[in-house]
Amino acid sequence: MMLSPDQAEADLSWTQSDPETMLNGLRAAGCSSDDPTEGEERAKCKTDPPLSREEKRRRRRATAKYRSAHATRERIRVEAFNVAFAELRKLLPTLPPDKKLSKIEILRLAICYISYLNHVLDV
């Protein structure tokens, strides 16, 4: 930001160490403080352009509350995914029956087993 010749550096709000003085300086510059979320103080100036839909989404996703909820949903999704693989694994014949298989091995074995069952039904 360029300083005009008649503006002293001491007039700038960010040079002040007192938070109350900084807030007063922001209000004087046409800025208002939004409700801070999670201890995060943010000032929004009236001269700022309106946020795009993508920018609003990006800011909403940056909050700790959103990340925590997303992590919980993802954990539940992965758990359901793993349960489905375990159920599929129980239906597939292997030697030995308790052999540990990867997910891709389970899928490939399921494809082979389904084609075998189709062949048995056709004969």
Image (tube, rainbow, N blue to C red):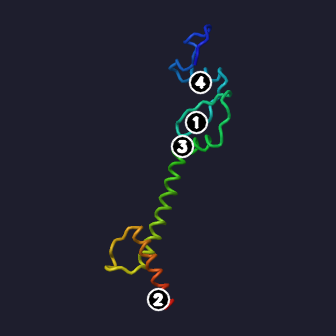
Residues at marks 3 and 1, CA–CA distance in whole angstroms: 11 Å
Looking at the rendered structure, which numbered label has been put on residue 14? none
Q: As drawn, is 13 to the left or to the right of 79?
A: right
Which comes sooner in the sequence, label 2 or label 4? 4
Which comes sooner in the sequence, label 2 or label 1? 1
Badge nearest the viewer, 4 or 3: 3
Which comes sooner in the sequence, label 3 or label 1? 1
Q: Position of residue 60 (x, y in %)?
A: 58, 44
Which comes sooner in the sequence, label 4 or label 1? 4
Please name the residue shown 57% across and 10% down the image.
Answer: 8
**What residue did someone put label 4 on?**
23
SS class of the residue under badge 2?
helix
Q: Quadrant of residue 24?
A: top right
Q: Position of residue 67 (x, y in %)?
A: 51, 48
**What residue did someone put label 3 on?**
63
Task: Give, as a three-letter code, the residue at label 2.
Answer: Val
Determine the residue located farthest toward the top in the rendered image.
Answer: 6
Front residue of this view, candidates 52 and 44? 52
Looking at the rendered structure, which numbered label has been put on residue 36? 1
SS class of the residue under badge 3?
loop
**What residue did someone put label 2 on?**
120
Mark 4 crowdedness (10 Å alpha carbons): few <14, some 14-19, many ≥20: some
Task: Give, as a three-letter code, the residue at label 4.
Answer: Leu
